[in-house]
Image (tube, grey):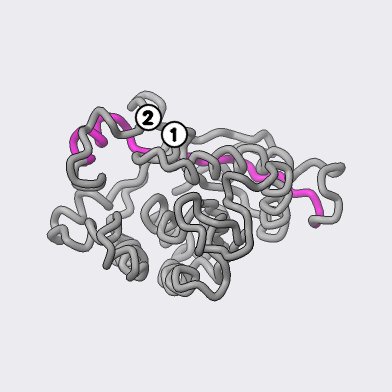
Amino acid sequence: MPLPSVLAVHAHPDDEALFCGGVLAQHAASGARTAVVTATWAKGTHRAAELARALDVLGAGAPRLLGYADARVPESAPGRARFLDAPLDEAVAALVGQIRDVRPEIVITTDAYGGMTGHPDHVHAHRVTALAVRSAGLPGFCPGAGSPWQPSALHLATHPRSVAVALGERLARPGTPAEALYCSEDAWITTTVDVRPWLPQKLAAILAHRSEVERGAAPGRIAALTPAVQREVLGTEWYIREDLGRRGGSATELSA
């Protein structure tokens, strides 16, 4: 039986593989519909091409790019505003259109801290997604953006504090102390998913972001780890579930 359909919303190409690549591969393998919206980088850029390869590995369809500029890389979307600077109602409306098109049971995005690094684009992706998932079901909101659709749950991809302390030095930039990592309290975690069966797809999707591997960003640091450590670091995904009130039951759960 297929697992619930999933739409992941993230700030940058590679976030989808790093934050929820295992869950995306798991749900796609079960026959569920999966898709990814990426807020930054434009069509025709090298990172958009890398994203397409990563999503093909994960079974998540073609890239859905909002086309804003990365906060730190203006050439990521020439002539477009930074994601952080775009009018909030504009970004929310664009994402509502994607939610109504995909019609997912579950939406995934980063936690309120924006993941371990606290990148401002990650934090903003959380804000925009939190508004969009609650607006997509309102008939009077953006009537030109498709028929209303209310997802059942929002899942926030995160790391519990105990894991950040134990594994953070392998994921963060060298020299980053554990206390400087943004993470959630262990008690906040509602969903822990063992994604080791789908680790080959998750790792391949991460490594598909070749430019990030080559410049030593998170995919590059992961590429340098031994297979045993990669399994330890990437084999579990953690989420905080927020039910959205459409209906309960299995439609709010990431795994069976």
Q: Position of residue 126 (x, y in %)?
A: 54, 40
Say which of 21 and 183 sits in front: 183
Q: Is residue 158 above or below residue 18?
A: above
Residue 63 is tagged as none
Q: Which residues are magenta?
A: 146-168
Q: Are marks 1 and 2 in contact (CB under 8 Å)?
A: yes
Q: Quadrant of residue 140?
A: top right
Q: Position of residue 226 (x, y in %)?
A: 12, 60
Say which of 249 and 12 sits in front: 12
Amino acid type of the residue that numbered disc 2 sits on in the rendered structure: Ser
The residue that disc 1 covers is 113
Q: Is residue 246 above or below residue 200?
A: above
Q: Is residue 163 above or below residue 136?
A: above
The residue that disc 2 covers is 184
Membership of 158 in magenta stretch: yes
Say which of 247 and 133 sits in front: 133
Tell which circle, 1 or 2, labels the residue nearer the N-terminal end: 1
Residue 116 in sight in this render: yes
Q: Position of residue 54 (x, y in %)?
A: 42, 69
Indicate the secondary structure of the residue bearing disc 1: loop
Write the residue at 51% across / 58% down. 74
